Amino acid sequence: MKALALSQFQQLNLTTAGLLIFFVYFCGVVWWVSRKSTRQTYQNLQNLPFEDGE
Amino acid sequence: MSTKIYYDDDIVKKFVVVTLIWGGAAFLFGLIAALQLAYWPLNLNLEWITFGRLRPLHTNAAIFAFAGNAIFAGIYHSSQRLLKTRMFSDTLSRIHFWGWQLIIVSAAITLPLGYTQSKEYAELEWPIDIAIALIWVVFAVNFFGTIAKRREKHMYVAIWFYIATIVTVAVLHIVNSIEIPVGFLKSYPVYAGIQDAMVQWWYGHNAVAFFLTTPFLGLMYYYIPKAVNRPVYSYRLSIVHFWALVFIYIWAGPHHLLYTSLPAWAQTLGVVFSVMLWAPSWGGMINGLLTLRGSWHLLRTDPIVKFLVTAVTFYGMSTFEGPLLSIKSVSALAHNTDWIIGHVHGGALGWNGMMSFGMIYYLVPRLWKTSLYSVALATKHFWISLLGILLYYISMWASGITQGLMWRAVDPQGRLMYPDFIETVVKIVPLYWVRAAGGLLFIIGFFIMVYNIIKTIQSAPAQQEQTPVIVPDEQPSSSTPDEGHRKLEGLAAVFTVLAVAAILVGSVIEIYPTLSLHKYVQPNKITDPYTPLELAGRDVYIKEGCYVCHTQQIRPLAAEVLRYGPPSTIEESMYDHPFQWGSKRTGPDLARVGKKYPDLWHYRHMIDPRSISAKSIMPNYPWLAEKKVDFVSLRKKLSVMKMLNVPYDDDTVANADIVAQKQAQTIADQLVTEGAPQGLADKELVALIAYLQALGQKGKKP
């Protein structure tokens, strides 16, 4: 199983697929946190350090 | 609804005070070590403070005592406020505090005495390793307990960085410290050769990532907004920063092993992910700096802001330089030189140091309910320290690049232009003085701060009454709907599992294949294990910290092969528990030094290196000719090695001490005929000579 997995490292299409998956995932995260609708939430979150009661 | 609560500020005060005490110690050790390189007699012929033992003490003190306590101060202070609750348990806080200080004291005792595993930043021996794991668990329980009882549903980005720090450091420490004890303060790691190198630098690099970077980023995301009284520039960017950094950083370790006998695929992964780190690191830096938008005037007036902004700037410079140094062709020049020393001090003094100082100036007046004794002194501290760091950084760049170029210089006939290693050392000694001057300035600045802080605390009101704060109770349903990442932020357990998954992916993919060493070893090149005496000598080599200045890994680069011989192979270090590849060449590589010189050469060189090489900066090791070899423990040592699959036969294990004494007698007799004094047969020096003469000789078979 392990030997099989290691032998696949040579397969360019597999490693390329891995790269694409991670890149698409990354773009997804960036899109997801940038959605307009989340503006208010993040504004609340970024003010947390100032709500310590001091 | 709202509640009256008391933050536990006493624990924060405790951590701040010890940060200052250990910081002073760490910086002084560093200054002495720097001066020893510029002027060797400062090793004072004393084994306890010789460079090879002092340097690990300096690095451990700087990382775990100074930066460690600064992190804890900041985490205990900011977490309570961000989570709107007191720490989970005051008792656990105190156990964490006193336990950590005890670990530091035990390190300060054992390292000068030569008890070391020789794995960089993980030198401490197994009983202390266990203590570190236990205290870290206490810290983790206390921290996650605080998260569990928090009054604020959402976890601010700083808290995520603290979570990543706590879980990852636990994984790194435990995996890298798996070792078999052979005595109360002596052990051998279960890993050998390329396995040990891979695990060690996976640990070593991520000690930088998850002990000196992620916790400090958490501090940055809290203290910069607090200091300038503005929210972070982009909260969205901080989310991307966090996940990208945590996922990518864990892969970068192999960039410490470029051109070594580590399999090429692992090296390539290390390079690719190191270069990728540019993006999240700079995203975070920009996020920190732009938090000052509209408040840049504070940079002129407020020393706290000066320190914090400079720290983030150094973070940006170090994280630019790091990926650069990870590119193979740059590494070929920079690796093993002072450039790397400059790089880490840019990070340690510039990023960790300045961040800690800014935080301390912010914390002390607030904790002791007073105002800073002198803003002018704090500003002086800033400028003196900054000048010191710049002198340090620039002198090490010049030194590293100069020496790296001299090592590789080849004339038109294909011969080394500086075949004598000492020529390249003499050239950079003046820069060692400049570096020491930079360090001195940094320390002067630090002591100005200590004076300023003491005066501040003295001016505090005698009655330090605890004032309660009023915090709103957690609202069951906030104004925004719970969905997606905002829900995730509320689920600390799920969040932690995802963070662990992110760091485990890279760890497993890189480490697991190298654990099956036999796959990479060519059966016809398998080497012989060390003889019992050579193993005893190897332990002397480890104890004296020879690996601090000498590598045992010849890279497949033309100039290196000309200077030291054929490149090192996987098989040559396959029985090395621990590996001794080193990371710095203050002296030449020793991978093939065996049989290059007669025994007497080594005897004279260890007693007085100047008698062999007039300009040498190596310390004298006169005690090696007086201290006796511990022959008795050899049976145990060999049996542990055998357990770790080093092929010793039962006879050799059972008679290890006798076999060793016999070999020692032969070497000692030979030394006498060459002109050395009588009576060396049971001394450490003979064992060390046996080991040095075996280096590079084990792979040669008829």
Image: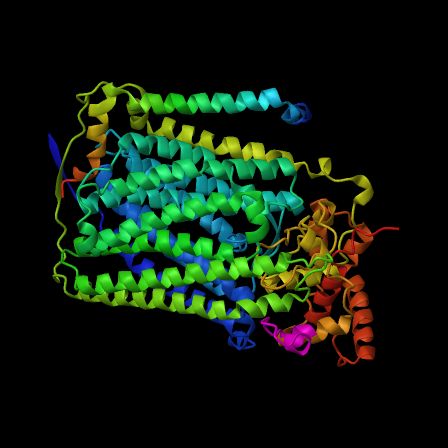
Q: Is residue B118 left or right of residue B276?
A: right
Q: Which residue lies furthest to the right in this view?
A: B702
Is residue B231 in view from this perspective? yes
The correct choice, above or below, for B328 with respect to B32 in the image is above
Q: Which of B558 and B25 is in front in this view?
A: B558
- In reply to whether residue A41 is colored magenta, the answer given is no
Is residue B185 in view from this perspective? no
Q: Position of residue B377 (x, y in %)?
A: 21, 65
The correct choice, above or below, for B43 with respect to B574 in the image is below
Q: Position of residue B3 (x, y in %)?
A: 13, 35
* The magenta segment: B605-621
- In reply to whether residue B617 is colored magenta, the answer given is yes
Q: Position of residue B463 (x, y in %)?
A: 12, 59
Q: Where is residue B578 in the image (x, y as percent from the top left)?
A: 63, 51
Q: Could you tell me which residue is drawn at 61 percent across and 64 percent down? A: B587
Q: Which of B291 and B406 is in front in this view?
A: B406
Q: Could you tell me which residue is drawn at 67 percent across and 67 percent down? A: B420
Q: Nearer the viewer, residue B164 or B591?
A: B591
Task: Please identify the dominant SS of the magenta region.
Answer: loop
The correct choice, above or below, for B169 with respect to B110 in the image is above
Q: Which residue lies furthest to the front in this view?
A: B412
Image quarter for residue B547? Answer: bottom right
> Quadrant of the image for the N terminus of chain B?
top left
Q: Is residue B654 left or right of residue B256?
A: right
